[in-house]
Amino acid sequence: MKLQNQRTAVCIGIALAFGGVPAWVAAQAQDVGATLSEVRVDASAEKESATAPVVGYRARNAATGTKTDTPLAETPQSVTVVTRDQLVDQGATTFQGALLYAAGVRSDAYGLDSRADSVRVRGSTPDTYLDGLRQNYNYYTSTTPAEPYALERIEVLRGPSGMLFGAGTVAGVVNMVSKRPQQEAQREVGVQLGSWGRKQLQADLTGPLTADGEWSYRLVAVARDANTQVDHVPDDRRLIAPSLAWRPSAATSLVLQAHWQQDRSGTTSQFLPWSGTLLPNPNGMLPISRFIGEPGDYYDSDRESIGYLFEHRFNDAWAVRQNLRLARNENRGGYHYADFFTIPGGWGADPVNQRLIGRLYGKNITRTRMAAVDTHLQGNLTTGALSHQLLLGVDWNRQTENKNEADDAYNAPIDAYAPVYGNVLNPTLIAKPENVQRQNGLYVQDQMKWGRWIFIAGLRYDRAVNSLAGQSDDRTSDTTKRLGVMYQLAGGWTPYVSYAESFSPVSGTNTYGQRFKPLEGEQIEVGVKYAPAGSATQFTAAVYDLKEKNQKVADPTNPDNSLQVGQTRNKGLELEYKARVATAFDLTAHYNYTDVDPLLENLPRHQAAVWGVYRFSIGGVRGFSAGAGYRWLSSFRDGTGPEVPAAGVVDALLAYDSQDWRYALNISNLADKKYMSTCLARGDCWWATRRNVVLSATYRF
C-alpha cells in the first residue's frame, strides 16, 4: 500500500506539471482515498495567474482586459481565454483553428487562408498582440501567421480597447501569450502525421538551469512539411522560440525571449467566381482543390524577434513592469488570383461557356521592422472605504515598411475545368515609398472596489505620426476613455455595464494617393458573469452596440482601391459557457448573434458551437479520452452577393494518455462537408476547410 501511495502521489505531480489531470490519475487517487485523504486535486483551488498554465478550459484570470492580473469575473467587458489544454484537446494546427470555439469570433471568415490569420470579432477585424505588444499595423503582408504550439493561451478582448492599447479597431484585441520558462522540469517531443501529406516534428522543453530555480529556460521548436487542400500550395514551417528566465528573488523576474520562424507556402485563396463554386455552372462545380495559378507560385515569410518581459515588486503594494520587443518580418509573394470582378461573380474571360477564367499575377516583397515597448506602474492603495488598483503607463511603438511591388499583370486565361500550366510571368518590381508609423501613448486606469461594487475608469492620450517618403507627415492625436461598473450578487452572479472607445490611424494611401482618415469607435456593453466560488463553472452573457467612423470598404468601381464610409453600427448578443466536472469532463459552448451594418462585409447572424471531452477507463486501463464538437453558422448574404447556405460540421477526438505518452487522433470536419465560408458581393467565393485528420504521438520525460 505504501508503494501504491507513492506511485499515486508521483502520478498526480506529473499530471499537474503537464497542465492536466487525466481521469486515470483521479481514479488512482480514489482507489487509495482512505490513506491519501489529504491529497486533493481541485482545479478551482489552484492558485492561478494571467500567464501561468491552466488546468482545463476555464481560466479565471487574464491580463488583456485590464493590463493587470485580474479575475475575469471582475472585468466589465467580454474576454474569452483559449487555454493550452483546450488547444491540445482540439488539436489546433493553425491560429484560425485555435479560435473556432471562441465566443464572438468568426475565425474562418475567409475559409482556409494560408497567407494570414483572418479573424473577425463582432463584425470587424481585431488587432493582434503577442505578450501585450502589437504584432503589426498593416495588411497581412506585414506579418506571419502564428504557431499555436508556441502559445500558452490566446485571449480575446471583444470590443474597443483604445484606453489600454492605443491604436486599434472596435473589434478589440486578440492577445497571444507565449509559453514561458517554468521552474519545474517539463519536457516533450512529438510527431504529427495527417491529411495533405502533413509531417511535423515538435518539441517543448522547459525547467530549471540552477538548483535554486533562479535561472530557468524554455525551448519550443517546430518543423513541418505539408501540403494543403489546394493543389500546388504547400504549408511548410520551421520555428525555434527559446526563452530564458532570471528570478533572483520573489520580487523580480526577467524573461528574455527570441523567435525565429520561416514559412514556405502559397495561397489557398483562389478568388474563384460565384458560378462554379456556389452557383450552377454549365460545366459543373469546380473542385475545392482547383489551382488556377502556376506551379511555383509562392507566398513565403520570415520573422525574427527578440525582447524581454520584466517585473519588479517594490513591496506588497507597488510594482513596475516593462515589455519590449524588436521584430523583423519579410514577406515575398508571387501568385495568381482569379478575375472575379470584370463581371462580378461571373467569368469575364469566357462569359458564355464559363470555362476559361481570367488571371492576374501579383508580385511583391515587403520588409517590416517593428519596435514596441510598454512600461507601467501598478499600485494598490485605499482611500476610506474604497480600495484602488492604480495603473500608470506609457507605451511607444514604431513600424517601418519597405515594399517592392509590381502592378498586377494579366496572364493568359486558363481552363479552370482542365487547367494546363506553363505560362509564367516575371514582372519587374518597383520600390514604393517607405512608410513609417509611430505611436506613443500615456494612460491611467483605476480599478476600484467598494463593498460589492466594482468600478473601472481609464483615460489615455495618443499621438500618432504616419510618414510616407516624399510627402508631409500625417499627424493625429486622440483621447480615449473607458468606464465600467459591476455589482457582485450572492452566488457568483455579477451584472455589469461598460463604455469603451477606440482610435486607430490607417496607414498608407488609396489607389489615388489620398491618405486615409483614422478610425474612431465607441461601444456600450451590458452583461452578466457567473463564476461561483469553489466551482469550475463560468458563464457570460453580453449585449453590445458599437459604432465606428471611417471604416474601409471595397470600391465597387475599382477592386484595387478602398473607400472610407461614415458611421457604421454593429449590434449583437453573445453567450459563453465553460465548465470542468469532477476532472472527468471539460465543456465549452457559445452562441453569437451578430447584426452587421449593411455597409460592411457581412457575417452570419447566428453562430453556435459546443465542444466536450470525457476522460474514462476501458477494462481497468485508465487514460482514455473522447471528445466531440459541433460548429454551426446560419445562412447569410454579403450585399448583392448570393446567399451562402447554413452549415454545420462535427469535430472529433480520441486520445490515450499514459504516464509518459500521449496518442491522439483529431478529426476536424468529420463528415468532410464541402461548404462556402463566404461569398463576397464583389464577386468571389472562399471555400471552408475540408476534413483534416491529424494523428499525433507525444513523449513526455
Image: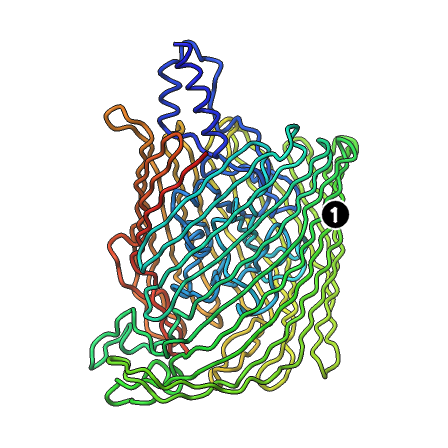
Nearer to the camera, 458 or 325? 325
Asked whether the viewer can see residue 526, the reply is yes
- Where is residue 538? Give x, y as percent: 47, 37
Q: Secondary structure at mark 1?
A: strand
Q: Which amino acid is tagged 1?
A: His
Furthest residue toward front = 210
Label 1 belongs to which residue? 376
Q: Is residue 159 above or below residue 365?
A: above
Q: How is the image coloured?
A: rainbow
Judge left or right: residue 610 versus residue 569: left
Residue 417 x %, y %? 24, 79
Q: Residues within 10 Å of mark 1 (few under 14, many from 20)?
A: many
In the visual, does 422 lie left or right of 300? left
Q: Is residue 346 above or below residue 291?
A: below
Residue at 45 percent across and 61 percent down: it is 595
Most foreground residue, 509 or 123: 509
Is residue 5 toward the left or the right of residue 321 in the image? left
Residue 95 coordinates in the image, percent (x, y)? 46, 55
Q: Is residue 613 above or below residue 114?
A: above
- Asked where in the image residue 278 lies, by quadrant, the reply is bottom left
Q: Position of residue 387 (x, y in %)?
A: 73, 34
Q: Residue at x 46, y 87 (%)?
A: 409
Q: How many marks?
A: 1
